[in-house]
Structures are given as C-alpha cells and as structure tokens.
Image (tube, helix red, strand yellow):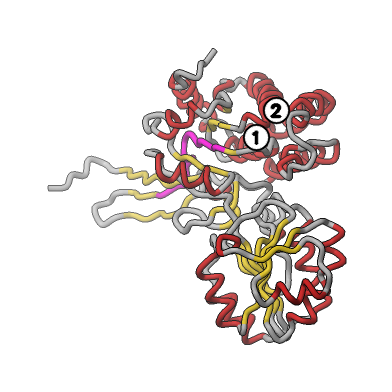
Amino acid sequence: MITEQSITPLLQETQLASASVRQLTDEQKAALLHRIADLVLTNAALILTENGKDLDAVPDGDPKKDRLLLNEKRIVALAASLRAVAQLPDPTGQLLVERTLEQGLQLRKIAVPLGVVGVIYESRPNVTLDVASLCLRSGNACVLKGGKEAYYSNTILVELIHQALREAGVPEAAVSLLPPDRSVVQELLTATRYVDIIIPRGSESLIKFVRQHSLVPTIETGAGVCHTYVEQSADLEKARDVVVNAKVSRPAACNALDCILVDEAVAPRFLPMLVADFTKWNVEIFADETAYPILLEAQYPLLQKAQADDFGREFLDYKCAVKVVSDAEEALGHIQAYSSRHSEAILSQNTVLIDRFLSKVDAATVYANASTRFTDGEVFGLGAEIGISTQKLHARGPFALEKLVTEKWIVVGDGQTRW
C-alpha cells in the first residue's frame, strides 16, 4: 500500500506501465474503453452506493454537491462518453512531416503519446473516467489525484478500470489513483523523472498553487470568470433566456456566467426581465451603483451592492455580478481587465459590433448570441475533455484527445555523417 509519505513507487510503476499502453493497437485501445463502459453500466448500483457515501458528507445547500452527484442518467452518460472516445480517431502514429534531406536521410515526424499525464482535480468523479479514457485512447498512462470529497466514487471507478486493464493484459498502474491526502501533491509536482505533464482542474486557488510549485510542465484548466455582454441592439427576450441559462443551468461549472454586462440604454428594461427567473433559482445579485437602484425598484429580493472584488470573481454558485456599461468599448475594457480567458459572450444584432467582439476578446471561446454553457469537449465533438485550457501554449479551449500527444522525429540513414 502506498502511504502518504511517498508516492514515488506508484509513480515508477505508472511510468513502466506507460510503455504497455503505448504499444496497444488502435483496436485494442478502443476495445478497452468499450469494456470499461460495459463495467460501468453493469456495476451502476455499486457506483451509486459508493457515490452516496461521498454525498452524505456534503451539505444539501453546497453547490459542489451537484458536481459530485452521480445518478443513473449520469452513469449512462459516462458510459456513452467512453464509447464516444473509443470511436474517435487514434491521434498517435499520425505522419506529420515526411521528406528526404539532401544527404539522403529519410525524415519523418509523427505524433506520439506524452507518456504519463498527472491530473489534479476536485469534486467531480466523472473526471476520473474522462481522463482515463482520453489518456488510454491516446496511448498515455495517467496519475489521478482526486479530492477527498469524491474518495469513494473515484475508488470504485478506478477499480472498474483496473479490472478492464487486467483483462486486456495491461498493468493496473497504467491508471493510478493517488491517496486523497493533500500531502502527496507536492511530491507529484516535483516528480520530473516519472510524470511528463501536470494538468490541474478545479478552483483558481488550486491552479495557482500548481502553477507556483510544479517543476513538471503544466497545462492550466478550469478557472472560468465568464461574462455576457447585453448590447443595446440585442433581442431582449432571447437575451434573458441566454443569461438565465448561462447562470442557473449548472452554476458550479466553469463555463457558467459570473458577470452580466448591460448597456445603459437597455438596462432599465432588461434587468427587471431577469427578476422572475432569478428569483425562482434564488440567484444572489451583486449589482454596481447603476444596476442596484434599477433592481431595487423592481423589488429583486436577493440584492447586494457590488464590492470591488465581486468583479473578476468565479462564483461557482447561484450568485452573479451585474455591471451597467456605457457602450461596447467599456464592456470590452471590463472583460479585458477581469476575464480569466475562458468563455465570453455578446448578445447583439449589430453585426459590426459582433465581429469586433469576436476578434478583439482574448478568450479560449467567444460567443455571439449563445450561452457560454456550451464550452465543453463533448459538446464540441471531442468525446470528452480533461478540462478547458485557458492558456495559449500546446492547448487552448476544451483540452481533449488530439492534444494528448507530442511529436517525434524519426531519421533513417545509410551511414551518413556530418562534420
């Protein structure tokens, strides 16, 4: 048993197992994912029992409970996602460049697995299957560091993955679950000999900690401070529906709306239109000095005056900031100042302004007249995702199968030398 004092033996085993995964054929990797999907469905009752142990420890009012929850519908969706990833093209082995050098050397560049992918995440047990499926499909091994709040859920899911790996003749260590203790994180972040990349998925504080302490290369995912700008030409009925959906459909998701920007020309009409739906969902509004009296007059019951730190804040809850802006220039400036570069939206019928917004806003995904809630690897046809990358190197946006590879140059000669 690996103790919290050292995870090095487990990391060594995972690195060794990565060679076995790398040697699997396209058909073998696809079959492995289909087998995991079968095991997930046939063991649904056991998964729900273990997930219930995790849920019992979380208060009903905590928004994290929805992220933690597994039910029959979600289990069916998890199995479907595994099968969807299995059907995606294998990203490894693709020939990227082929040429003959003047010295007669045969040169090829091909896509190859990264090796060992470490992922640190919180709450969501679905991430366990998403990461494992994407890594195995792309020929990688993975090290999973889930949160203690999902301990029982993650454990049973990894046990099912291990069963499928054993049946396929692949070492169980190809998918390794670390102890939930925070003490193991520092060792993981410095395991440069055994782990090729670290991907943090979770809160802004988690991502910041990994960025500051990791010696292993990292890809940042997860933190989303998302804005929706209601421009004065917008169809206000549609705008209301989009804003409500972006905020309440799943507020604990990283693509959920955090701040509504409203043109002052339509704020007196638009903001009262939110009252009924936001009241129904008990959304607490943090309004700036212009929005506050409008919502107060509309008798919005859960109203607070916004403080400076309410802007640029990822709420992950039924809470939302509102700011009234004078024009598109002010809206763009606010987004530039406070965005986490995840997902940003404009609601407008002015095509010139829409084009300007889409080209000027620096974010992984930008929207015109649609909810930011669509930023998702599965929705984008990627099968699943490890997270939403908000950085610019290697991967940006939904980080999925096609980005879990690197490149290898292969050079074949016949005795050539260079002096």
> Does the residue at mark 1 contact the one at mark 2 (Cβ under 8 Å)?
yes
The tag earlier along the polypeptide, 1 or 2, is: 1
The picture places residue 385, in percent across and down from the top left corner, at 63, 47
Q: Is residue 264 above or below residue 96?
A: below
Q: Secondary structure at mark 2?
A: helix
View extreme (left): residue: 419
Q: Which mark is residue 157?
A: 2
Q: Nearer the viewer, residue 181 or 302?
A: 302
Relative to residue 417, is residue 287 drawn left or right? right
Q: Is residue 116 magenta?
A: yes
Judge from the rendering whether residue 237 lies leftward or rightward of residue 106; answer left or right.
right
Image quadrant of residue 357?
bottom right
Residue 214 falls in image quadrant: top left
Dot 1 corresponds to which residue?
128
Task: Considering the whole magenta stretch, tell me its main secondary structure.
Answer: strand
Could you tell me how far apart the alpha carbons at marks 1 and 2 are, in whole angstroms? 7 Å
- Answer whether residue 60 is magenta in the image: no
Q: How far across and how far down the image is residue 104, in percent?
A: 27, 51
The residue located at (70%, 74%) in the rendering is 291
Amino acid on which disc 2 is placed: Leu
Residue type for callout 1? Thr
Residue stretch in magenta: 109-120
In the visual, does 27 lie left or right of 210? right
Q: Answer yes or no: is residue 164 visible.
A: no
Number of residues whose C-alpha sits closer than 10 Å to that of mark 1, classed few (under 14), some (14–19) or many (20 or more): many
The quarter of the rendered structure image containing the N terminus is top right
Which SS class for mark 1? helix
The structure residue drawn at horizontal position 54% and vertical position 65%, both measured from the top left corner, is 338
